[in-house]
Image (cartoon, rainbow, N blue to C red):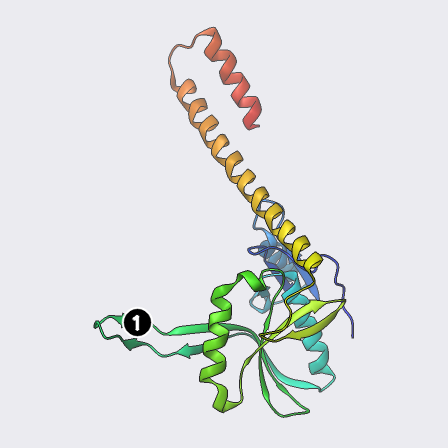
Amino acid sequence: MSFNSKNRYHPEGKKTYFINGQKFYNSKGQRDGKQKAIDYCLANFLNSNDIITFDSDLECNRYIYLKELENASKIKNLGVHYLLKVQDEFINANGDFIPAITYNADFIYQDCETGKRVVEDVKGASLFEDTRFLIEKQLFDHNFKEKGLYIKVVLWRDKKWVEWKIGDKKKPSKLIKKQREELKKLKAEKHQREVEERRKERLKKRYDELLEKPKRTKREEARLLEIKALLS
């Protein structure tokens, strides 16, 4: 079984919308992917409520792979984004109310060969930086042990899906370095965008201030035109 792995991983926040075998992504700096998917539904007489949202293209590709397994009768009852309670709410020794801890599984399905229920989470480069998830996994695996359940962590390695287990070697050092550099680059780009947005806000504020002045000097007139050109 195969799928198109091109651009398979998007950074956190880069949503992938999937319907009828089609994927839609947000444009750079915009969150219009959902609208693109809705427009596609309108053009093809599809129900927009059937659009599935994924946190990354990698997760979407795993869904396509699991659908192929379901169509081949190797798994059944495939569910997406299934909310499970990891720990009940309780009152601590100080009398404080501690809310329940919930975990939103990427996928849940039944393996037709073993008959067992599988709870699955797809992870990319951020796995070993996501300490919250690792804690959730430990809690879940402990509390659901008697039911034969645990969170199956799936990674895309060497052009195939593999299950990662706690204690496994994380990744080759070269791959870790490469992914860290990618994450660093993404953070730097995000920071640059934020800096640019703040700069635009300052320019807009100054533009409005100059525009509201009843009389402006030649220097202010020149600055007003300069800001207008920059904003456009």
Q: Among all residues in the image, which is located at the extreme top?
A: 218
Question: Is 97 or 33 nearer to us in this picture?
Answer: 97
Q: Residue at x 78, y 75 (%)?
A: 1
Q: Quadrant of the C terminus?
A: top right
Q: Residue at x 74, y 84 (%)?
A: 72
Query: Residue lying farthest right?
Result: 1
Q: Residue at x 59, y 69 (%)?
A: 50
> Of the residues shown, which amino acid type is indicated by label 1?
Ile
User: Which residue is the extreme one toward the left?
Assistant: 95
Question: Which of the two residues, 137 or 105, is positioned nearer the viewer here?
Answer: 137
Residue 154: % across, % down: 64, 72
Q: Which residue is identified by label 1?
A: 98
Residue 4 drawn above or below residue 84: above
| x and y percentages locating residue 143 in the rendered image | 44, 83
Would residue 217 be seen by someone viewing this image from the given angle? yes
- Residue drawn at point x = 26 percent, y = 72 percent: 97
Q: Is residue 19 visible?
A: no
Residue 226 position, x and y percent, is 54, 18
Above or below, 62 relative to 125: below
Residue 24 in the image: state x and y as whole percent: 65, 57
**Number of marks in picture:** 1
Image position of 2 with respect to 144: above or below: above
SS at badge 1? strand
The answer to which quarter of the image holds residue 172 is: bottom right
Within 10 Å of the Cα at label 1, are there few (<14), some (14-19), or many (20+) other Cα atoms? few
